[in-house]
């Protein structure tokens, strides 16, 4: 098995404020193969930008080590200077030089190249990011998306060992962010670079990354491809963060050969594999076991004939469909994706049924028999 191109091995980063030591990152590990794009995903304050700064060399390690292309660049006793790590960074605010045109911004970090080689590199990157006709323009003459492409080209110009992107789309509107995420992934892949993206937006993470680390309280809750995060969240933190959904209590009755889960909205069949997992999690041999079931918008369908009803709290039009926020009899709320032609009003009772194909279930506690 080949060695990882980037290895973060049990990283710990501390801050000291007013004489008190605060742990920002604790025992964090991940690895990326050459050419892979990884993402650190999580809310503000979870430590993801601190990890990026440690990889750059801007933050010392309190523990663990960073290995890049087989070379250890940092540990608790040693830190290679940022300029020797050969890492490119795309900052949140792009940090373009306003007095330099696009060509000189892109070529800023490769001034030691021969003039002809530098010009060819700049023109090639400008072509790759779709700015071949804008080399003489200045940053203030560009749109936000174009400025982002200049920043990306400048970071790629020295052919860095690793490319780091710190919330690179946060200053752009939603539609542009999602479109650029796909384009930037293609650009990075074409360059052959290995990269880490930091974002709080899971749509950006899904569009760009081969592997995603959901961060919580300075640690990685799960490091997996996007489809595994969605279908097999490792814990409640990941389940709660990935996708819009709600954890609804239920009761599993069955054994290691399978069974069913009773919910407010009906019954869910349980496979032998899931049944075994639930029984092991609850340290039980048989039912009943209290569980929490993750219900996302695609897990609930409108069905006027269903005996199960919920009260419409609000609806949000999304073009081809709309999102219904529904209040169950217990007072809990769930989201359902329904046809855009439906026209229920807030306060109406709406018939619904479960359409769960891949149940995400966590054992809660042993239920009362």
Image (tube, rainbow, N blue to C red):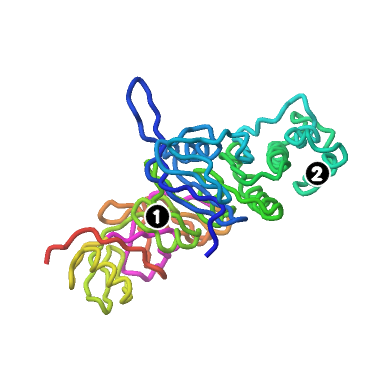
The crowding category of the residue bearing disc 2, from other C-alpha atoms within 10 Å (few below 14, some 14 to 19, many at least 20), is: many
Identify whether 291 is placed above or below 199.
below
Q: Residue at x 84, y 44 (%)?
A: 120
Q: Disc 2 vs disc 1: which is toward the camera?
A: 2
Q: Is residue 127 left or right of residue 363?
A: right
Residue 59 in magenta? no
Please tell me which of labels 2 and 1 falls first in the chain. 2
Along the line of sight, which residue is nearer the eye, 5 or 196?
A: 5
Q: Which mark is residue 245?
A: 1
Q: Residue at x 24, y 67 (%)?
A: 280
> Which stretch is magenta?
292-317
Q: Say which quadrant the C terminus sits in.
A: bottom left
Magenta stretch: helix, strand or loop mostly: strand
Q: Which mark is residue 121?
A: 2
Residue 310 in magenta? yes
Q: Is residue 167 left or right of residue 14?
A: right
| Secondary structure under the numbered disc 2 in the rendered image | helix
Mark 2 and mark 1: Cα distance apart in space: 46 Å
Q: Is residue 26 left or right of residue 321?
A: left
Residue at far left of view: 369
| Secondary structure under the numbered disc 1 in the rendered image | strand
Residue 21 at x, y percent in the picture: 34, 28
Q: Which mark is residue 1?
A: none
Residue 304 at x, y percent in the picture: 40, 67
Looking at the rendered structure, the number of numbered marks drawn on it comes to 2
Identify whether 329 is placed above or below 133.
below
Residue at far top of view: 18
Q: Is residue 308 left or right of residue 147?
A: left
Residue 38 at x, y percent in the picture: 54, 51
Along the line of sight, which residue is nearer the eye, 200 or 212?
A: 212
Identify whether 259 is placed above or below 328.
below
């Amino acid at each position: 098995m080949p060695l990882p191109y980037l290895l973060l091995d049990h990283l710990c980063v501390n801050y000291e404020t007013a004489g008190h030591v605060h742990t920002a990152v604790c025992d964090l590990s991940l690895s990326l193969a050459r050419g892979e794009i990884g993402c650190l995903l999580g809310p503000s304050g979870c430590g993801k930008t601190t990890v990026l700064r440690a990889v750059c060399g801007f933050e010392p390690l309190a523990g663990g080590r960073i290995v890049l292309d087989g070379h250890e660049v940092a540990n608790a006793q040693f830190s290679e200077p940022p300029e020797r790590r050969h890492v490119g960074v795309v900052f949140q605010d792009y940090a373009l030089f306003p007095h330099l045109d696009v060509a000189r911004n892109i070529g800023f970090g490769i001034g030691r190249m021969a003039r002809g080689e530098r010009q060819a590199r700049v023109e090639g990157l400008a072509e790759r990011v779709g700015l071949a006709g804008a080399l003489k323009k200045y940053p203030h003459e560009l749109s936000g998306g174009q400025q982002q492409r200049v920043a990306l080209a400048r970071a790629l110009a020295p052919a860095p060992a690793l490319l780091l992107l710190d919330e690179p789309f946060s200053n752009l509107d939603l539609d542009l962010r999602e479109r650029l995420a796909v384009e930037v992934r293609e650009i990075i892949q074409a360059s052959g670079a290995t990269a880490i993206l930091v974002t709080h937006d899971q749509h950006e993470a899904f569009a760009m990354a081969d592997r995603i680390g959901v961060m919580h309280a300075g640690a990685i809750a799960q490091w997996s491809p996007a489809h595994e995060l969605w279908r097999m969240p490792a814990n409640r933190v990941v389940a709660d963060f990935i996708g819009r959904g709600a954890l609804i209590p239920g009761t599993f009755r069955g054994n290691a050969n399978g069974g069913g889960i009773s919910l407010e909205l009906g019954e869910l069949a349980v496979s032998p594999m899931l049944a075994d997992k639930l029984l092991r999690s609850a340290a039980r041999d048989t039912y009943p076991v209290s569980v929490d079931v993750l219900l996302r918008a695609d897990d609930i369908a409108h069905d006027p004939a269903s005996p199960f009803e919920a009260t419409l709290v609000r609806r949000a039009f999304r073009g081809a469909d709309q999102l219904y926020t529904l209040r169950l009899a217990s007072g809990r709320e769930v989201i359902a994706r329904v046809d855009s032609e439906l026209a229920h009003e807030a306060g109406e009772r709406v018939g619904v049924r479960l359409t769960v194909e891949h149940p995400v279930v966590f054992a809660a506690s042993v239920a009362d028999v």
